[in-house]
Amino acid sequence: MKKTLKDFDFKNKRVLLRADLNVPLDNKEITNDARIRKSLPSIKYILDQGGSVVLLSHLGRPKGVYDENLSLKPVAKRISELLGQEVKLLADKNVISDEIIEEIKKVKAGQVVMLENTRFNPAEKKNDQEFSKKLAGACDIFISDAFGTTHRAHASNVGVASFLPSGVGFLIEKEIKYFSEALNNPKRPFVIIMGGVKVSDKIGVIENLFDKVDKLIIVGAMAYTFYKAMGYSVGKSFVEEDKLDLAKSILDQAKEKKVKLILPVDTLVAPEMKNGYPRKVVSCKEIPDDLMGLDIGDETIKEIKEELKDARTVIWNGPAGVFELEDFSKGTFAIAEILANLDQALTVIGGGDSASAVEKSGYEDKISHISTGGGASLELIEGKKLPGIECIEEA
Ligand code: ADP
Ligand code: MG
């Protein structure tokens, strides 16, 4: 168990808090502030306990140099509004300097300040020790709450931990709780639904879970690589031609390990990956040459519902179709609805696109846990150790 917020006395302590404030921007305007809102509980808890907060976050990909368009200025403004108190941006093009350190030393209990986009300094991505030491210097405790970067060892989320007592915030605590419950001690039947584009992206996940799951349901574009490997024609559907052997070996492993592997029986096809073309549902084994599979069909949705009926643990990664386009979104949203109605099951969503699909489906509140970190959640399901979590002190 890693130390969490409850393990610290924050009274009169300056807390360096690595948050994930990497929000989408359109010309310096925040288009979705969900990440800022999700960061508030940890900040408020530290303030309520009598501490002060020095916020760290990256924003976009500024390549180690100052970029006015990626300043955290609009984020500081929004977080001030949401918190109902001023959050001052201690702006420096190099993020940290002697002047900024002096400013941090003046921060009093109950106050919140923010440093500039950590990726303005090339030392951030190098996990540079000097830079980390300066960031940590004027603070007393480090709290890590940016799950989305835990698979990267950078100065603001890993380097700083070697200079301060450390713990995780509420967001990472929740990620660890749900993933370890699902992966280390799953109630059975344990089912994994894998979808999305590439088998090659997900092979690590599949191989790590083969020994743990009872059923593996494959949907999304991935399914066509399996069908091609089985000798069926898949028309213009997306296929990884160089992964046919890999698909075959997954089919063999499933048999060997007695994991029930379920592939779609029908598929929604269209001539182009665009809304508004004529669509029809065909058998997955008979996709016409001039059409491509872009979603699962109704028979498959029914079968998935049946296979999940008695599931007690479900991990879902990868959409069932091109859910971004309304014409091909039904299957993905149907799976979200099925999971939402499994009252007895622990349901965990990993993967960036899967998380946004579930949010878009409207069933967000009825899912046990939607991971806030796309790449990080995949690496966790693959069984990898995440540097951003490993570096935190044990309770
Ligand atoms: P995640 O981010 O959840 O891990 P991926 O990145 O692997 O998921 O895959 C998400 C993408 O897969 C979505 O953009 C979706 O449009 C695409 N996709 C799903 N099914 C198909 C399909 N049949 N053909 C092409 N793309 C698909
Ligand atoms: Mg993705």
Image (cartoon, rainbow, N blue to C red):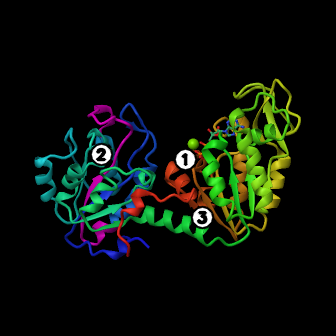
Residue at (36, 62) in percent of width and height = 391
The correct choice, above or below, for 117 with respect to 65 in the image is: below
Q: Element at badge 1?
A: helix
The correct choice, above or below, for 270 with respect to 175 in the image is: above
Q: Element at badge 3?
A: loop
Residue at image mark 2: 124
Q: Which quadrant of the figure has residue 212? A: bottom right
Taking the image as drawn, is residue 77 in sight? no
**Residue 196: image tag:** none
Residue at image mark 3: 368
**Residue 352: image tag:** 1
Residue 232 in picture, x, y percent from top left: 85, 36
Ligand 2 shows up in which quadrant of the image? top right
The correct choice, above or below, for 170 with respect to 303 in the image is: below
* The CB of the residue at mark 1 lies under 8 Å from ligand 1: yes
- Give amino acid for label 3: Ser
Q: Residues within 10 Å of mark 2 (few under 14, many from 20)?
A: many
Tell me the magenta residue range: 45-71
